[in-house]
Amino acid sequence: MRGGTSVDKIIANVAGRTIEESSIEQFKLGLRGKLLRPGDDDYDSSRRVFNAMIDKHPALIARCAGVADVIQAVNFARQNNLVVAVRGGGHNVAGNAMCDGGLVIDLSNLKGIRVDPARRTAQAEAGATLGEFDHETQAHEQGTTLGVFSPTGIAGLTLGGGYGWLAGKYGLASDNLLSADVVTAEGKLISANSEENQDLFWGLRGGGGNFGVVTSFTYKLHPVSRVLAGSVAWPIARTGEVLHFLRDFTSQVPDELGLVAALFTTPDDIPIVGITVCYAGPIEEGERVLAPIRKFGPPLVDTIGPMKYVQVQKMLDPLLPWGLYNYWKSAFFKDLSEPIIDTIETYAKTCPSLNTFIMIELYSGAASRVPPDATAFNHRGKLYNFSILSVWKNPADSERNLEWTRTFWNSIQPFLSNRVYVNYLSQEGEERVRAAYGNNYERLEILKKKYDPSNLFRVNQNIKPPVPIPAQ
């Protein structure tokens, strides 16, 4: 007995059958890493993820020490008909890194990163975070597009597309993916790239964790060292003016500019509206490009200046501390219209939490010029990504924050598109998953049927294998 309940019983409730204790012990002995069960010392800490709203209790957590452990875990789950979740960085808001009652394949200890500065490539294991990857690549003054929050895991970010500061200049993280090593539902290790398993390689670039467990990623690197970056912010009362300025300013921007606008509360409890930028080009040219932002009205703060790229990757980290309650709503739009501006301005005044923020990310440049069917990620063309990121500390405040977020979302949704970035999806149902892939969804269904016909990997934004139409 562990924690008052036998592992056999926990698994039986999920799989509809009992797994013998001897089978579990055999599985455990076959791992180089640790197998955790309810009641073990590290169990509770290992089931915690970024979002405190996620409180799931897996029957088993396999903390993999290498690819062989991943293969063992996939085979054990398949043979015993277990629900499977795969954990990389654990930063996904939907909580798909955990499951109730089944097996978690935990990759968080797989952090090997090998940089080849001459070839400008880097191979990184699936447990690495953005910050860890940047630490290694920046030693060679190289980098690639990888998110805007450094604690994020590279795996989930890349498999969902991977927006970041360098997207305008170099494309998304998935656009810079050269190859991936994948453990399939059959427990086989294969590589997917432009020469091997090309169909899978297409699906991994945006299709999430639907097709297997990716154990390592190989990326194309680019020269990235010092950039011109920082934030300019104004009082929240100027929200309308700032968003109108933002619309005009972003009508034409160079590929070198990454930009995120946000409405949030400072540590001094001052509500502000800000624009954070990263110009990955000559500093002198960046000064010229960013001059209109710095000259727009008297700002409360202006931190723009030359800095190392690793510093840029951490600029927004304070907005998303680990372990708070998170509930997000998000969608793309093409034009920063008057109804969008008015709605944001209205709801920013009534936000119930000092930790909540509203974010608009600019998708442009190289990332926007990739054909929509070139990868599973199909949101191409110049776009803005709007997000309400509700964050709060006290669980007693949950209902109030959820209600505000849903009311805000219902008010602004008619002015947005039905397209959504899969990495920002919560548990919102099949229709929203389809919206994440648009015209690419049917091709992804076919791919799912080929690589995971039993839908073993379904604790994700799930693409279900197509069901055959019965003969008449």
Image (tube, grey):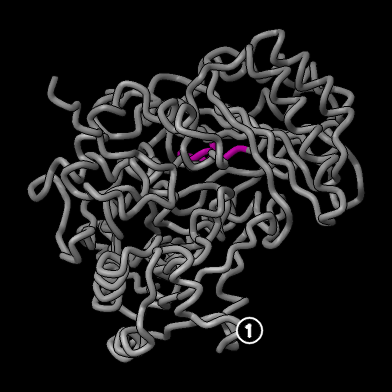
The residue at the point 54 percent across, 24 percent down is: 384
Q: Position of residue 48 (x, y in %)?
A: 61, 68
Q: Nearer the viewer, residue 256 or 154?
A: 154
Residue 282 lies, in percent from the top left, at 47, 39
Q: Residue at x 37, y 29 (%)?
A: 437
| Quarter of image, res 461 | top left
**Residue 280 forms part of the magenta stretch:** yes
Q: Is residue 181 visible?
A: no
Q: Quadrant of residue 118?
A: bottom left
Q: Is residue 420 left or right of residue 65?
A: right
Q: Horizontal and vertical percent for residue 8?
A: 45, 79
Is 187 placed above or below 285 here? Answer: below
Residue 208 visible in the shown view: yes
Q: Secondary structure at mark 1?
A: loop
Q: Position of residue 362 (x, y in %)?
A: 54, 28
Vertical side of 367 occupied by 450: above or below: below
Q: Which residue is mark 1?
A: 4
Left or right? Give the position of 238 relative to 261.
right
Q: Nearer the viewer, residue 351 or 135?
A: 351
Segment tinted magenta in the rendering: 277-284
In the displayed structure, does residue 429 sit left or right of residue 139?
Answer: right
Decide: is 275 above or below 151. above
Q: Where is the C terminus found, in terms of image quarters?
A: top left
